[in-house]
Amino acid sequence: MKKILLILALLFVNELTQAQSRNRSRSRSRSQVDVTSEFGIMGGINFNNPKINALNTGGNELSDVGQGNFGFHIGLYSTIDFEMFAIQPEVYYSQQGGKFKVNTTQENEFKLSLIQIPLLGRYNFLEYFHVLAGPQFGIPIQAEVSFSGGSPTDVKDQIKGLDVAAVIGIGVTIPEYKVNGSLRWSKGFSQMIEEPGTTSGSVTSLKNSMIQISASYAFGG
């Protein structure tokens, strides 16, 4: 009887040890996160809608006279993916700006080109979808104003050197084809005019805002 009890006790201790080992293994597997990364090229269309203030022919400042225009963007992106959550830094060239009127006959256009650097967080859901949000930092490289379709005037020296914006968006991923697409809205907080002009048609205030349709292709990981 004692031998039977001893054998049963040894079997119980052995089973308990194995169960603890299995639990530790499951805990380790749960704590491990599958980290992947990729990088690729991105590009798309900008629907620019800036807020512009400008001077009319009488020298008075008119508020919010901006109208939308179209531009494009092209650049590179990288994604560091922690399964449900990812970090997505990007760098791309972006055509922005907008049209504006200071009277009923004169339509002017403000063209602004920037190197944009978003630092985005990405939350993945429903396997193929994700949402994006984060800050974006723009470095102006070109700024021009065209008055009533005339020759453009360089106004780069009147523009501040940094545009700070916030970005939110939603996207879709098709990993089988290494393709991503997104719809984004960026809202600029920086007043970009550092030295407002004093002549008719001069832009006195500009804050960028745009909607982007963007597609990307991953060529590395």
Image (cartoon, helix red, strand yellow):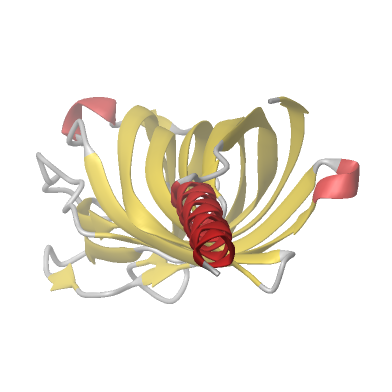
Q: Is residue 84 visible?
A: no
**Residue 142 vs residue 175: left or right?**
left
> How many badges with numbers are in the image?
0
**Of residues 36 and 188, which is closer to you in this image?**
36
Q: Is residue 181 visible?
A: yes
Q: In which quarter of the image is the N terminus?
A: bottom right
**Above or below — where is 93 with respect to 133?**
above
**Which residue sits at x=38%, y=63%?**
50
**Residue 167 vs residue 18: left or right?**
left
**Which residue sits at x=25%, y=43%?**
163
**Residue 202 vs residue 166: left or right?**
left
Residue 55's spot in the image, x, y percent?
19, 62
Q: Quadrant of the C terminus?
A: top right
**Above or below — where is 117 with respect to 101?**
above
**Above or below — where is 8 with respect to 179?**
below
**Which residue sits at x=68%, y=40%?**
43
**Residue 214 vs residue 137: left or right?**
right
**Which residue sits at x=74%, y=64%?**
128
**Of residues 129 and 58, which is closer to you in this image?**
129
